[in-house]
Amino acid sequence: MNTFATARPATTTRVVLPGLVEPDGLEVGTHPLAAPGRGQLLVAVEATGVSFAEQSMRRGRYFGQPEFPFTPGYDLVGRVIEVGPGGDTAMLGRRVATMTKTGAWAAHAVVEARDSIPVPDGVTSEDAETVVVNGVTAWQMLHRSARVKSGQTILVFGANGGVGGILIQLARLHGVHVIGAASPRHHEALRAEGVAPVDYADPELAARVRELAPHGVDAVFDNVGGEMTKTAFSLLARGGKLVTYSIITAVSGDGPLMLPFVKAIGQALLWSALPNGRSATFYDLWAGHRMRPATFRRHLESDLGRVLALLEDGTISANIAARFPLVEVVAALRLAESRTLNGKVILLP
């Protein structure tokens, strides 16, 4: 019998994004705390983080983000202090990792039970936070989207980022050769990880990659978009696959947001139909969340569970760039947006 019990606080600390503001426009305040509904959990947040998604939402540049004002925070790790009506009381007192999309930048959060996975006792909340969305994304792109095999070679854009760093570790563990595209400031760290680095801004990028992989690469993981995606596809070997998982060029701009995504998906479909043995896809972390909830949950439980197990036994490591108290979110966001980091910025409520 689970004897864990704690009183629900009447209020909690929460970060609010009020509109299109600079980082110092974020508001940290005390807000009423609602009870969890059916299928939900109330979690005392122990760690959350800053990702490119929140940086995009600050600019109003994240596709499908809610109307202002709202609390950002794409994922969290925390302890369950209350379950909704009819919920599994065995979850009380357990730590969970939850994909939230928004709402995680708070001391307490009401989350969906179906998007929450138990965290092993041997993994700290801070370390687990680095692999929630990033780990699921990396695992699924490598093993479900591209189906990369041992001995093959891949090209990873954003190699120093949260997704890229985990993707590299998973690929190396799988016996895959990795070429990592990143700013030169990160090349030494990439070499230490067994990665062949290239400068993503080098006009001769394609030539550099072909020197390292004369017959082409077996998969490319692209978060840049635009003209870079065309270059990436041209670098594929026969049978290779391009996986686009973001379009930084569009998100960082100021033009229409939907059109670049529609074009990217259409381009992937067109390329995949060509008789050249190469294919392309646009990876969507939330695909099937509404239409195939059982399958989505099964994949989330399996894939995040595997990544957390690898983290627990030390096979892969968490890459934390910096830690900040939640109330210092302005400084944390500024640092994350500086693009100078290797790893993830963690917020600690």
Image: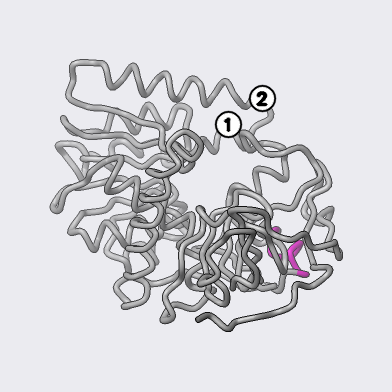
Q: How is the image coloured?
A: one colour
Q: Quadrant of residue 23?
A: bottom right
Q: Position of residue 325 (x, y in %)?
A: 71, 74
Q: Position of residue 96 (x, y in %)?
A: 52, 67
Helix, strand or loop at label 2? It is loop
Name the foreground residue: 321 vs 124. Answer: 124
Residue at (31% x, 66% y) in the render: 193
Kindly indicate whether the residue at mark 2 contacts the one at mark 1 (C-beta within 8 angstroms): yes
Q: Is residue 270 magenta?
A: no
Q: Amino acid at mark 1?
A: Ala
Q: Is residue 332 magenta?
A: yes
Q: Amino acid at mark 2?
A: Gly
Task: Return the disc, 1 or 2, that comes first in the chain's sequence.
Answer: 1
Tell me the quarter of the image containing the C terminus. bottom right
Q: Which residues are magenta?
A: 327-333
Name the foreground residue: 85 vs 221. Answer: 85
Q: Residues within 10 Å of mark 1 (few under 14, many from 20)?
A: many
Q: Is residue 10 left or right of residue 97?
A: right
**Alpha carbon separation for disc pair 1 and 2:** 7 Å
Q: Which residue is mark 2?
A: 255
Q: Position of residue 50 (x, y in %)?
A: 62, 58
Q: Which residue is mark 1?
A: 250
Helix, strand or loop at label 1? It is helix
